[in-house]
Image: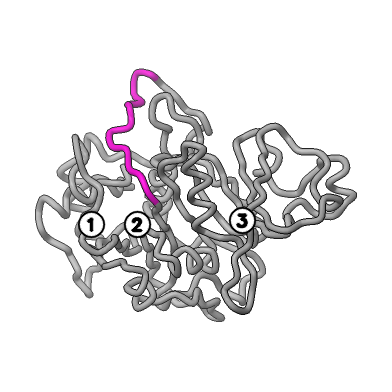
Amino acid sequence: MVNCKLLFAFINTTGRSFHNPSSGYHDLYTIISQRHKSIVKMNAPLPLNSQDDDTIQDEPLRVEGVTLKMAFDRSYAVADNSDKKSERFTCPLSLDLVHRLRRCSDAVLVGRRTVERDDCTLTVRRVPLWKGKEQPARVVLDPQLKIFGNTGEQADGQYKYTLLKDDLTTRVYYGNVEEKKLPLLLQDSVTLVNTAYQSDGTNQRLSPHNIIQDLKSEGFRHLMIEGGSATAIEFLSEKLIDRAIMIRAPMDFIDPVSSGMSDAMMNEAGLELLKAVPCGDDTVEFWSKVGIPWPTGGTVKLWEWPC
């Protein structure tokens, strides 16, 4: 299995894209494997806090702002209604890329429905953490605090979802909830943050701008938004996304769940497509605010971030 960072570096060096309809992208992996047999290794999940001082390095590039990550089929669909449960549909190399983005982030944000659907941990597992760096904080937008369940579950603290009980930092943003409905028992790692609603004319919702400002005030410099699509659209609509990594799998869902997103929406949010490269069986698109280049600096060359 070839590391995406090596793949991007190879593409950047050779200037070849290998878009060969008859052979796909496998020829590229054959070439890389032949030239770099000594450094191509199988990527395997690592312990949550895998730290080996002999091998783990300091983070080579600190990036700030907001980075959106989304995954789709060929048609901007994010899931399949024909499946009974949510399943990963991107390739292992794309998953490695996602985990590298997580380890480059201070916090990873999702909406309530992503937690309910996936019981996600949002932790770094497929790559080692940078030296001295902890797991990113998890941020959940849950206006009515529905992930805490009913009153009986709140009373004894036996919550359903992993990120409410695994002792890693979690911040849950909510709106106007009656005091009697607030969770009675929380782990020290879980923080509730009340934030004012804003109206979009028909609905009241949590303010993405206020959430980002609060996170900045708490020292979170780089925020990764990992879904779902409704949450992504809210941040895009307020032009709060600095860059985006869009992963496209070579498939079409049988009964697609549309994301509601499009290239036009990305452009309206002030983003432009900088580059699209193969990553295993998938294609990864790099989007950035108009006029702002992709992060690079120090030992990190262009297209090597997230590293």
Callout 3 environment at 10 Å: few (<14), some (14 to 19), or many (20+)? Answer: many
Contact check, label 2 and label 1, Cβ < 8 Å: yes
Whether the magenta-drawn stretch holds residue 10 is answered as no
> Which range is magenta?
53-65
Element under disc 3: strand
The total number of labels drawn is 3
Which residue occupies 49% across, 49% down?
Answer: 213
Which residue occupies 40% across, 67% down?
Answer: 249
Whole-percent x, y for residue 296 in the image: 21, 45
Callout 1 environment at 10 Å: few (<14), some (14 to 19), or many (20+)? Answer: few
How far separated are the C-alphas under marks 2 and 1?
9 Å
Mark 3 or mark 2, which is nearer the start of the sequence?
A: 3
The amino acid type of the residue labelled 1 equals: Ile
Mark 3 or mark 1, which is nearer the start of the sequence?
A: 3
Q: Is residue 246 left or right of residue 35?
A: right
Residue under pointer 2: 242
Residue 264 higher or lower than 19, as above or below: below
Which residue occupies 63% across, 57% down?
Answer: 196
Q: Main secondary structure of the magenta part?
A: loop
Which residue occupies 59% across, 78% down?
Answer: 201
Element under disc 1: loop
Mark 1 or mark 2, which is nearer the start of the sequence?
A: 2
Residue under pointer 3: 141
Residue 230 higher or lower than 31, as above or below: below
Residue under pointer 1: 292
